[in-house]
Image (cartoon, helix red, strand yellow):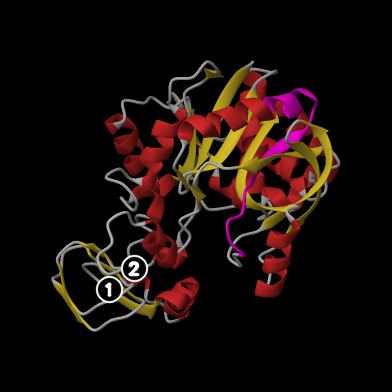
Amino acid sequence: MKIFPVIMCGGSGTRMWPLSTGNQPKQYHKIVTQNTMFQETLRRINIKSKLNIAPPTIVCSKDHQAIVTKQCLAENITPHHIVLEPMGRNTAAVGAIIAEIIGKEEPDGIVLLLPADHHIGDPDKFWEYINHGLQAVKGGFLTTLGILPTRPDTGFGYIHQGKSIGHNIYEIKEFVEKPELNLAEAYLASGEYFWNAGIFLFSCWAMSNSFTEFAPDILQDVKYTLSVSNIEGNVIHLDAAAFEKCRNVSIDYAIMERSNNVAMVAPVDIQWNDIGSWGAIHDMSSELKNGNAELGDIISIDCKGSYLRSEGLAVAAIGLENMIVVATKTSILIAPLDRAQDVKKIVEQLRSSRRDDLL
């Protein structure tokens, strides 16, 4: 049984502005370590393992092909495929495309679908959970990982645990969108809810069958797109006119929330973080001075609990407490740490003002 890792690189990372932009989203930046998040993901799936793991398939924007190629080369990795999207159509289209591509090559192939921009501190343990999840996949289940929650976080989606169908494998009662704080606290107290990491493990035939039943329009549009797309070596250039017709929806909503053959491995404890905001970066920073994380040319006096970062400019800060300051060559972000999630509102305002030069 061969596992085909598929790295989804389509995220725009709006809450990580101004570092994350359309030209270079957060997954292609060095955020947590000295490697980019995409490179960390490549390293994680290239780990030595007893499992039969194929080289990764990369799904990314056509505008980022050069970045992907360069960073794969830096890791000495030749992708199995690079699928270039002319525009974003969310994760359902990706799931259907991959099931078609891999399914034709290896009918019994198993797909590991995962984001490019998450941090996993214990990759060896990650693969132990993936190996564990293969039990459910062999039974025809579309399988996901339920991350053990450590706090009542309102920035994550949750998965409600159903009945046990194996050791640490459960059916899923429901997927829950990002909750209000009181609900998140209740979820944590119950012990029955887990964070949804957006990591999926499935057989191609099971996923294709699910699309046939629950989203046949996406499957039909994907099949047509692939039939008219240009292929150069291991690079698949998705046809723009055809792909644009695909419904823009997540795989969670189109398939996982509707299918009756969905399972979850839980609790999963792999030091996971979706790196969804500057606040998350601050919390993960290993070198803190008075609770500050300082990167780049920073001069600070009497600052506490803040995230201070510069990509070139000298930044001087005095008396800041629990603040975010991120400076790039074109923009400076200043915000309270507890409003880190609102950075995406700045991006929305820039878009409405047609400030494409800053995006």
Q: Is residue 146 magenta?
A: yes
Label ID, residue 18 = 2
Q: Which residues are magenta?
A: 134-152
Could you classify mark 2 by the number of other residues whose Cα lies within 10 Å: few (under 14), some (14-19), or many (20 or more)?
A: many
Q: Quadrant of residue 76?
A: top left
Q: Is residue 206 left or right of residue 96?
A: right
The percent coordinates of residue 350 (x first, y second) are: 42, 77
Depth order, front residue of 260/9: 260
Q: Are marks 2 and 1 in contact (CB under 8 Å)?
A: yes
Q: Quadrant of the C terminus?
A: bottom left
Looking at the image, which residue is at 67% across and 46% down?
92
Q: Amino acid at mark 1?
A: Ser
**Mark toward the start of the polypeptide (2 vs 1):** 2
Label ID, residue 244 = none
**Residue topped by disc 1:** 331
Q: Is residue 321 magenta?
A: no
Q: Is residue 1 left or right of residue 190?
A: left
